Image: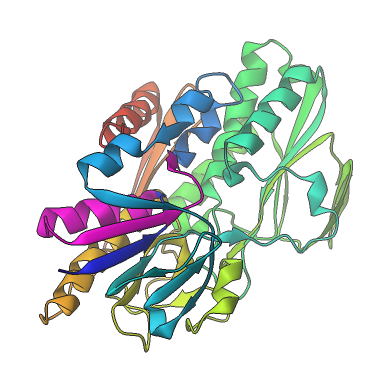
Amino acid sequence: MNNITIIGSGFAGLSAIRQLRKQDKHCNITLISPRPELQYLPSLIWVPSGLRDRSDIIVPLHNFFKRMDVTYHQANVTGLRDAGRTVETDAGDVSNDGLIIASGGRFLKKLPGIEHAITPCEGIDAAEKIRDKLSSMTGGTIAFGFAGNPKEPSAMRGGPMFEFLFGTDTLLKRRGIRDKFKLVFFSPADKPGNRLGPKAVGRLLDEMKQRDIETHLGHKMKAFEKNKVITEGAEFDADLIIFMPGMTGNLWFDNSELPRSEGGLIRANRHCKVESMEAVYVAGDSGSFPGPDWMPKQAHMADLQAEAAAKNLLSELNGQRADAVFKVELICIVDSNDKGMMVSRTENKNIMLPGTIFLHWAKRFFEWWYLRKYR
């Protein structure tokens, strides 16, 4: 009987469990994570407006683990040894016959003064901090921006920043105080959101113009101060800074033999297998995968990679050909609390649907549909 270990209880880790159980009812599955819960990060954008709260975002996983016959090991991973066969944690070692790493990424916090900015996708605590700050403000300047990892082009998460930006504009209008605020969007990219496709970039910038949102684009970030954003091209005052930096690998990767990309992620092939290691796979934000430069770091992509990783790991352990390949696909609804713009991109086509209230409700329906599998 195969003993399989999964690191991480995010989208990739849970999708891997479901795929493993779909194909093998009897293998032993152990999942390692600090908390037995899923944080549904796509819905963090609705926390500042009160549309969602902590109880909506955090999904306890005890029932899911019981249904899937998963052994839960509550711990922080600290390292990996024996060519991947032993996972080191602060609550003891966990051995395995096969391993799937789905521990997510880590935000780069190297910019001077970055402690003055809130990084919303760090989780519910950050989203609540934004909510509380917005509720206390009666006017001022709010700056929204994102950057990438120069050594890992795919390791960025810019889409949610457009949603926090447009959602905040909608929220302030509903409160009748939008005229008391200046909203500013900044990015070192000339065409922020370019991975969504050329049409989407133009539509996003047009939306900013229509909403009277100021832009500072194409200038490398230098630093933050308590009430200031500083770039190589300009600097401006801000009473609240919401910023998403680029991503890199987890700190525990340094205590392992895992092959790393220049940007610090785990090098893997199109089958999600970690280079030069047996029965070790990676899915989601932890991995550096071959593919187009627009390949996203998002929940949908993590799910697709996790399914391929689980299939291939079982095939390898059973002496079969491990040839499943993940589909490269970007699907997102850029929501603004009252409407949504849908973008879909594959290697063959790029589709954009303009903003409608229907797409806002479609995003909310998908949240319910997705989470019902884990509640």
- Farthest residue toward the bottom? 276
Quadrant location of the N terminus? bottom left
Which quarter of the picture shows residue 307?
bottom left
Name, please, the residue furthest toward the front: 92
Q: Residue furthest top?
A: 176
- Above or below residue 294? Residue 333 is above
Q: Is residue 197 visible?
A: no
What number of labels is visible? 0
In this view, the residue in front, 208 or 288, is 288
Which x, y percent locates residue 150?
Answer: 63, 72
As for residue 88 lying within the magenta part, the answer is no
Residue 180 appears left or right of 335 = right
| 289 vs 63: above or below | below
Q: Position of residue 135 (x, y in %)?
A: 72, 18
Q: Locate the C terminus and report the quarter of the image it occupies.
A: top left
Compared to residue 49, the image places residue 198 above or below, namely below
Q: Is residue 81 visible?
A: yes
Residue drawn at point x = 33 percent, y = 72 percent? 281
Q: Residue at x 54, y 43 (%)?
A: 160
Position in image of residue 313 (x %, y %)? 23, 72
State the residue in front, 140 or 41: 41
**Viewer-closest of 172 and 349:** 172
Query: In percent of the image, x 49 and y 84: which residue is there?
Result: 257
Residue 36 lies in magenta, yes or no? Answer: yes
Quarter residue 245 falls in: bottom right
Kindly identify the residue that appears in the image at 29 percent across and 35 percent down: 63
Residue segment shown in magenta? 11-38
Figure quadrant of residue 364 = top left
